[in-house]
Amino acid sequence: MTEKFERPWHRHYPEEIPATLDYDRKALHQFLYEAADLYPKKKALHFMGKEITYEEVLQQTETFAAYMQKLGLEKGDRVAIMLPNSPQSVIAYYGILMAGGIVVQTNPLYMERELEYQMNDSGAKMIICLDILYPKVSDVKGNTDLEHVIITGIKDYLPFPKNRIYPFVQKRQYKLVVTPEQTHDTHLWENILQSTEDKVIPVDIDPEQDLALLQYTGGTTGYPKGVMLTHLNLVANTQMSMNWLYKCKRGEEIVLGVLPFFHVYGMTAVMNLSIMMGSKMILLPKFDAGEVLKTIDKQRPTLFPGAPTIYIALLNHPSLKKYDLSSIEACISGSAPLPVEVQERFERVTGGKLVEGYGLTETSPVTHSNFVWDRRVNGSIGVPWPDTDAKIFRMESDEEAEFEEVGEIVVKGPQVMKGYWGRKEDTDEVLNAEGWFRTGDLGYMNGEGYFYVVDRKKDMIIAGGFNIYPREVEEVLYEHEAVQEAVVVGIPDPYRGETVKAFIVKREDSSVSEQELNDFCRKHMAAYKVPRIYEFRDELPKTAVGKILRRTLIEEEKNKQGTGSTEPV
C-alpha cells in the first residue's frame, strides 16, 4: 500500500478509480504466467496474418529463457533487444526477465555509433536483433562486451506462403540478403525454439529493488542516459493503466500495437497492459497510415494508444472514409501535446474517446491523464494517476508555486525510476531525497488540480525579454485548416536574442502562404508570440514513436547561422 494523501484532483476521480491501489509485489513476467493460466487457448498475438495463443507464447518464452541461461546469463546481466514490434520482441522481453536479466531496449534505426555507445554504457552481454540489422551489430561487437548475438527475421512468424515470399521482398526493399549461420556466439531464433530439452531455472526477484529495464532517454540534451526501472515501477504503472481504463474487460480487449515496444510508452500501454489484462495484441512492425487503417477495419481493435502525429496521419489519409474505425473505444495519446482540433476530429471519425496523457521515460512512463469516460479538460494533461503526487516548483528551487503560476512540474510515485545507470550526479540533479522527480517541463496547476504543460524548460523561447511557449503558438497554427503539422522553435536573432520560427507541413491539396499564416496568427495571439519566419516542408524529423524532433530543427538553424552546438544529440 502506498502512502495516502489528499489532493485537489482526487475529488474529480470517478468512484470506479481508487486514489490508492494495492500493487502486486511480483516480478513483471509473472503476469504472463497468469494470463496463460487463465486464457491458454486465447489468441495473444496477431502478426501479419499469424496468430499465437497465450499458451504458445509462454512455452516459447520459457524455451528462450532457458537457452539464455544455458549461454551463461546470470541475474542482473543486461540483454539488448533490437527489434520492431513482432512476436519475437514480446517473447524476448519476457524471456530475459524470466531468466533474471535486465532488458535494454534498443532502437532498430540506430546507426553503428549509437549502437556501440548504448552497448558500452549498458554493458550488455547479449543482443537479439533482426537479420537485416546483423551487419551493424557485427561491426560494433568487437568494441563492446557483447558475447552472444541472437538473430531472427520477420519471416520467422509469417504464415505460409508469406514466409516464403518475404525474403524476396526484403531483398528488394533493403538491397540486402543476410544468411547468418549458427556458431558458438551467433544463434538463430528458429534453432533456439527447437531446443526444448532445457528448462528455465526460476530466479528470485525483489520487485522493489531488482531492475527489469534500462530504458534510454532520447539524448536530445546530451548523451542518452539509461533509466533504471524496477519490476515494481513497471507493474505499478501498468496496474494504474488498468484502473484508469476501468470499463475495459479482462480477456476481451483487442489492443493495436502501433507504438514501438522499444519506446517506454508502447512497452507499458500496449505490451505490458495487454499481457496483464489477457488482451489480444495486434502487432505492426512499422507505422504506415494506410496499413493502420486497413488493420483497424479488419481486426477491430478496441484500444489504440498512440501519439498525436499518428492520429494526424490517419485523419489526413486520402482513403480515410473507406475504412470503418468504429471499433475503437479508447485512446490515450502520449509523447507530445495533443492539439484539441485533432482530438475532436478523431473522436468524430471513430466514435471513441481520445484523451491526452503525460509522462516521461523516467516515470515508466505515465503520471497524468485526462479521464477517458469522465470529466476532461481540453488543453490540459489531466490529473495525476493513483498514488502519484505532483506539484509545481518555482524555477531552480524546491519552493512550491501558487495556483496558475508557471514553474517546473515535479512528480512522486511508485512509477518513478531508481535513477540513471552509472550516473549518480545526473540522478541527484533531478531526484531529491524526498523522491520528487524534476521533469524539466514547464507547466502550472489550476485550483481544481488539473495540470497544464506550457513547454520543455529548455524549449522556452525568450524573444525581446518575453517568455514564449512553443506549444501555445503551435495550438494556434493547428487551428488553421491548411496545417497538418506544425512545430515552433526559437532561433538566434541579433536584435531579439531569439525569434520565433514555424515549420509547417500542409495538408494534401491545401494551399496557404506565409502571409496568410501570419495574418491568422495575429488574430489569435499577442504580436510578440507570432512567428517571424515560416518554412514549409514535406515532412518533419520525428522519433520512432512519432514525436517531432524540435532539437534537430534547432541544430539545423544554428548550423545555418554558423552557431551550431558540438553537443551530441
Image (cartoon, rainbow, N blue to C red):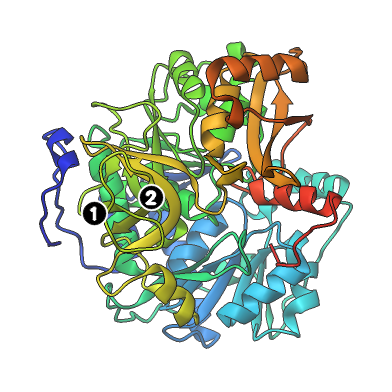
Name which quarter of the figure residue 393 lies in: bottom left
Q: Is residue 149 left or right of residue 545?
A: right
Image mark for residue 389: 1
Secondary structure, mark 2, is strand
| Left or right relative to 115: residue 366 | left
Question: Looking at the rendering, which quadrant does residue 416 occupy?
Answer: bottom left
Amino acid identity at mark 2: Gly
- Work out whether residue 344 can be spotted: yes
Residue drawn 68% across the image and 67% down it: 151
Between marks 1 and 2, how big is the CA–CA gap? 16 Å
Please give the residue where the numbered disc 2 appears in the rendered image: 407
- How many neighbours does mark 1 have within 10 angstroms: few (below 14), some (14-19), or many (20 or more)? some
Q: Position of residue 296 (x, y in %)?
A: 52, 26
Image quarter hosting the N terminus: bottom left
Q: Is residue 305 left or right of residue 517?
A: left
Where does residue 106 sit, x and y in percent of width and height? 60, 64
